[in-house]
Amino acid sequence: MNFTFTSEQEAIGVAVLKLCAGFGDDYWLEKDRTDVWPADFYKAMADAGWLGIAMPQEYGGSGLGITEAAIMMQALGESGGGMGAIAAVQTSIGCMNPLAAYATPEQKRRMLPPLMQGKDMICFAVTEPDTGLEILKLNTRAVRDKDHYIISGRKTWISSAQVADRMLVLARTTPLADVKQPTEGLTLFHAAFDRKHITAEVIEKMGHGAVDSNLVTINDLPVPVSDRIGDEGKGYETILYGLNAERILIAAGAIGIGKAALARAATYARQRVVFDRPIGKNQSIQHPLAECWMEMQAANLMVFRAASLYDEGKPCAAEANAAKYLAAESAFKTCTRAVMTHGGYGYAKEYHVERYLREIIGSRLAPVTPQMVKCFIAENVLGLPKSY
């Protein structure tokens, strides 16, 4: 068992941090204040080839794995970009993952290069206002009409819909009452984000305003059959393929934010002098920060354990969910402690730790709540009866 990265993997983190140095704290603070999409940052990531890090080389990607993508996501968080930087990139990677696995060769040639190059902006439309995590009960319908499907419905918490021109959308093609199993009858589409048929209303939220979240309403959107991903009615298994990768990448980003917060807290504790001594000399400051470091180190091991299993094609649902839970919880504790270490200044935007705290809360809530992770582990690892 080897816990070290290769020199090539280490170089990924170094290179991403170097790119991010051109988008410093003031950049992200301004994006947070103004709720403006970080277009120049996104373009820089695309131009450097980072959006295609885990995509096949034959379609223009780097041909690397989720482990390398997780290293990249962690560096984005560690750079100080926080969830603004992470969410801007993660949505595209999250959408490309099921395309790379289930799209036809013709679809991959047509769909993947523009996404990796940043020419196409995409959003991921699964969650609905009335069903939440109950994906099997979603109400968005897709009705076949000759060589098209007509899609109607509502989706919520859809990132980047204000700037998207494509949408990966899950819809029910067979009514729930007409299928033998509730997992049947769902279909995935790579659709044009046609604003003649789609409206996107921004949801004002606590953190990472740089990447918009939206309530999306779809009215009779025509989608060619050629833009259906996988077989009709098999969309649920297509979506499941991407969920573990999504949890791993969110977990890696959360650890990155925690690292940024811990670094700021330690620096402040060394420099802040009260009663003729640096506050970092006090064990009441030292010990909580030391705890944060240890807990994040443990969570990080689970992140890359899950990533390793994923890249080896082995089952990793328990590890991916545990990684997401442990990373988000330890990073939240760290960000909270960073604010407290700064005292009153921790509440001030100019010190940035309050931004980290606001943004890390989202990692606890999405894409799955801590309570649902515990239920998953209880049922699928410990063999306990389903509680809901």
Image (cartoon, rainbow, N blue to C red):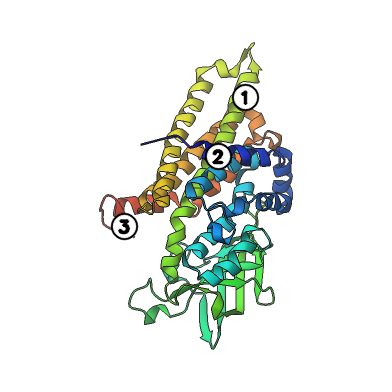
Q: Which mark is residue 223?
A: none
Q: Nearer the viewer, residue 301 or 366?
A: 301
Q: For the image shown, how many numbered marks are present on the structure?
A: 3
Q: Could you tell me the amino acid type at mark 3?
A: Ser
Looking at the picture, how far across and down is residue 276, in whole percent? 64, 11
Residue 15, quarter of the rendered image = top right
Residue at 51% x, 83% y is 143
Q: Could you tell me the amino acid type at mark 1?
A: Thr
For marks 3 and 1, give the one nearer the viewer.
1
- Sequence-wise, the earlier of marks 2 and 1 is 2
For marks 2 and 1, give the one nearer the viewer.
2
Q: Is residue 33 left or right of residue 300?
A: right
Q: Which residue is mark 2?
A: 256
Going by the picture, which residue comes out furthest to the top? 276
Q: Nearer the viewer, residue 124 or 376?
A: 124
Residue 133, quarter of the rendered image = bottom left
In the depicted structure, whether residue 380 falls above or below residue 120: above
Q: CA distance from mark 2 to mark 1?
A: 17 Å
Residue 89 visible (yes or no): yes
Quadrant of the snapshot with the C terminus? bottom left
Q: In terms of secondary structure, where does tag 3 sit?
A: loop
- Sequence-wise, the earlier of marks 3 and 1 is 1
Q: Which residue is mark 1?
A: 267
Q: CA distance from mark 3 to mark 1?
A: 45 Å
Residue 300, quarter of the rendered image = top left
Q: Is residue 97 left or right of residue 350?
A: left
For marks 3 and 2, give the one nearer the viewer.
2
Q: Which mark is residue 387?
A: 3
